[in-house]
Amino acid sequence: MLSVSLTRLQRRLVALSRFGGLLGGGVTRPAWSPQHEEARAWLITEMRGAGLATWVDPAGNTFGSLGATALASDRPAVLTGSHIDTVPEGGMLDGALGVIAGLECLEVLAETKTAHQRPLAVAAWTDEEGRYGSLFGSRAFCGKLDGASVVDMAAVDGERLADVMARAGFDARRAPEAKAPAGSVAAYVELHIEQGPRLEESGVQIGVVEAIVGVRRSRIVFRGQADHAGTTPMERRRDAFLAAADYALRAREHVVTRGTNRSVTNIGVVHVHPGASNIVPGRAELVHEMRDPDVAVLERLWQECRGLADSVARERQIAVDVVPMSATVPALAAPRVQASIEAACRSLGLTSQRMYSAAGHDAQNLAAITDMGMLFIPSKGGRSHRVDEMSDWDAIERGANTLLHTLLTLARA
Ligand code: GLV
Ligand code: MN
Ligand code: MN
């Protein structure tokens, strides 16, 4: 039976992890950073070495293909892929696995001259982690990028997307031109680490994704009054940080008690201004994120948290602005892609279970233009978005072989 080379997978995953690799383990490789651009150049060289045709679109998505030199409406391709950007202090598998495994699958098919009716391509989507904009590259590819908003996009530290794209040789205004020709993608399937504990705890080898959560992010800015931290009587202070802290605790409680058992929330960015120990904070900014696979639940929670921010501000006599930052929509995997993954598992003798993805993925954008599916392998200890994120090499090999046979089924359909 056709199978991937674990040695080659290992070599490439380790090589990729060196771009932005941190002393002591882990990777910091944000989209468009010099480390990311070096990784992109390396990836293109590896793709060409594997016999693939390569191209990069105006949103920075990088493609390698077998049997086609571009995507075209009259020859729909089966697509796989993931991303090579990482979160700060992230791991070596989130995104990298899907790209490197996709490349490996195509290389095996090329080497063995295996027949496949449809062209096959692997994509590395730009800025999946959303430093500048959630799922940016796949959004552009799927025709969902608002051209007018691109020039204003910036990271939470203020770094502008247009500037970093220009540094990498891209024109941000042209990113929407990455839109795929209508009908050019026959199906999309992505291999990813689970990033949570469910597969490991149930002892199941492959997760077959049924749905992907939507993620909503907003910037919440409390504006109080800066004052001398020693001389201002306590009862006269209008402390923006305390409002932010109060909001953080109450919003968490609200989502836990009023959401579903799938609703989660996080505040991972906090800035206090001016940021000196002897000044009462005049301004506090939070980035508040919420997730749920049901768009109606997500919308309700978002509205309710907005009301909560107003209440907190009113009670503390300070002002608040709630600024929506991004909203990705939940997506369903296509039954035929799920069935192809399950058929691959059966033929490889692997156990599988259906599950929803609590992490966001480019696949949720692809669902708008084609039949989408994803498969997961267990993450050690359920750990991800941290430097010690890892999966067993056997699990990686199993995931890549499942991807290979799923791609073959889809490319013959
Ligand atoms: C992607 O990694 C996410 O934040 O879900
Ligand atoms: Mn991630
Ligand atoms: Mn990822």
Image (tube, grey):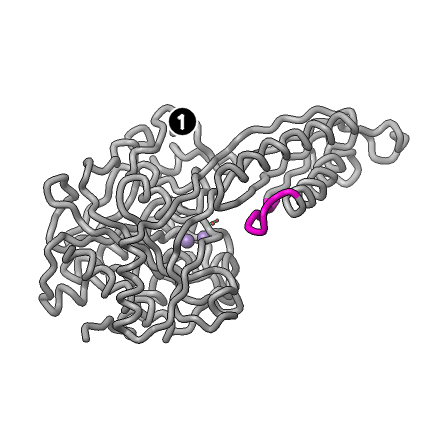
- Give the left or right position of residue 56, taking residue 258 as reference: left
Residue 66 appears in which quarter of the rendering? bottom left
10 Å crowding of disc 1: few (<14), some (14-19), many (20+): few
User: Image height check: is 406 above or below 141?
Assistant: below
> Is 9 in front, or is 158?
9
Range covered by the magenta-colored residues:
258-268
- Image location of residue 186, percent across then percent down: 20, 47
Residue 135 spot, x, y in % from top left? 39, 42
- Whether 337 is drawn above or below 165: the answer is below
Residue 295 placed where, x, y %?
A: 48, 39
Question: SS for tag 1?
Answer: helix
Residue 353 in sight: yes
What type is the residue that disc 1 sits on? Answer: Ser
On the image, numbered disc 1 is attached to which residue?
Answer: 149
The residue shown at (69%, 33%) is 274
Q: Is mark 1 within 8 Å of ligand 1?
A: no
In the image, taking residue 145 as reference, residue 63 lies left or right, namely left
The structure residue drawn at horizontal position 12% and vertical position 69%, both measured from the top left corner, is: 112
Camera-side residue of 48 and 74 = 74
Indicate left or right for 253 with 151 as reference. right
Judge by depth and name the residue closer to the eye, 40 or 150: 150
Left or right: 20, with 62 as reference point: right
Name the residue: 10% across, 55% down. Answer: 117
